[in-house]
Image: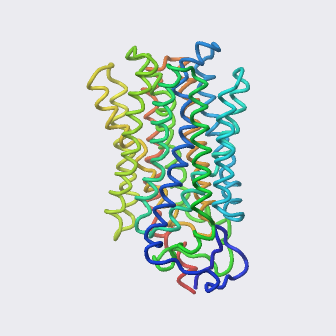
Amino acid sequence: MTSLVTGSRVDDTVVDPASTQAPTKKARRLFPWVVFTLTFALLLSDYMSRQVLSAVFPFLKLEWALTDTQLGALTSVVALTVGLLAVPLSLLGDRWGRVRSIVLMAVIWSLATAGSAVAANYEQLMLARVFIGVGEAAYGSVGLAVVLAVFPAYKRASFTGAFMAGGSFGSVLGVALGGALAVQFGWRWSFGAMAVLGFVLVLLYRMFISDKKLDAHRVDDAAEGEPVSVPGKRAPLRTLFSTPSVIAAYVGSGLQLFLAGSLFAWLPSYLNRAYGLAPDRAAALAALAILLMGTGMIVCGWVTDRLSRHVAIRKWTTAIVYSLLSLVLLGVGFALEPGAPQLLLLGVGIFFAAGTTGPAGAMVANLTHESIRATAFGTLTLANNLLGLAAGPVVTGMLADRLGLESAMKIVPMVAVGALVALILGRRAYPKSLLKVNAPAVTR
């Protein structure tokens, strides 16, 4: 017997299924894709608002005489805020309603992005960036929980990879569009355009998606052979850390995204300094590279689902392969002198740099219960941000101030060694961990 879910939250009371009209077959096919499209679009807005800053680094550095550490801090403070607030705000989303939470979060980050456009100094911009982090804190986790709730379990790595690739695509659009707007109209217009887009998408989301509609289209985990919640109750929060494998998934994913965080923030500046490109051309080339990263997330997630549909442990194997490829290719690439061979190796390495995202999300989903899945993804977001997306830009900036940016980027890929260790340990423990999570469901 499985628990009944109302809207996006699991209540202590049982809901009569007859009280909600079942959707038609056409609506059941179409609505999940509406959910994915609009939730993905808001994730694009999320990362466009976050990463547009990278495109205007050269303008801010010149206008306000900022150091690389200060510039890196403007990026890292968003990821740090996201990391610190991801779990409590994801828990709130599980209990208050996931759609309502998504709408509120998008309004907050759009307002904060508008505030960035009118910041008069570094301190005001830093404050606006903090509030962007507040708005974005639980969006990835709650949004992913919403998407996975309406698609079958055997597609989780694919949809996790595709959804989280919105971060890369949003970064591409934010950096490319932000760089073009900054050159033509000034850096403040870069932030203003992102804010307007956010407000438009909020209105569309509110019009087409609700917690009630999500409940009607939810895919039953029990029917997919996945862990289920205690009937009528939320799963205990301690189950977020109940197995060695889920802990390894958090840590491995976070360390791997250190590479992605550094590339998001510093690739435009690296191309500007190492290749002498103008800010707008450097931003455009960096955007193309990040587009490769997003494409890699989708492809790697799809490959993982194909290989692991009947052999679950292959999720870990594929993640290990992706991490190893990024370590070797980026390590060798940044060690080369600027030129075509370097760009080729960096491009392939960037393709695999965030390839672990889809497998990691599927691992966490398989090792936690739907009733607290947004909170589980919030915990994954905490690890991704504190170990990766927050640490990457600021640590790289500190290294750049001491060694130069080109030397700093040679060191960055070594962090993948830690990710590999965590993923290998998680793979070894996965069979027993999965049995432990499924044991309560088997006894019912």
Between 318 and 143, the residue placed more toward the observer is 143
Note whether 365 is above or below 20 in the view shown. above
Taking the spot 55% from the left edge, 46% from the top edge, the residue there is: 384
Please identify the quarter of the rendering in which residue 126 is found: top right
Q: Nearer the viewer, residue 110 or 96?
A: 110
Indicate left or right for 309 with 260 as reference.
left
Q: Is residue 148 above or below residue 72?
A: below
- Asked where in the image residue 213 lies, by quadrant, the reply is bottom right
Residue found 40% across the figure and 48% down from its top: 297
Residue 137 % position (x, y): 65, 47
Q: Compared with residue 112, is residue 366 higher up or lower down, i.e. above or below?
A: below
Left or right? Give the position of 329 relative to 35.
left
- 248 sits left or right of 159 in the view: right
Colour mapping = rainbow
Residue shown at the point (53%, 73%) measured from the top left: 217
**Residue 143 coordinates in the image, percent (x, y):** 57, 56
The N terminus, quarter of image: bottom right
Question: Residue 155 appears at what percent x and percent y?
Answer: 41, 65
The C terminus - image quarter: bottom right
The quadrant in which residue 306 appears is bottom left
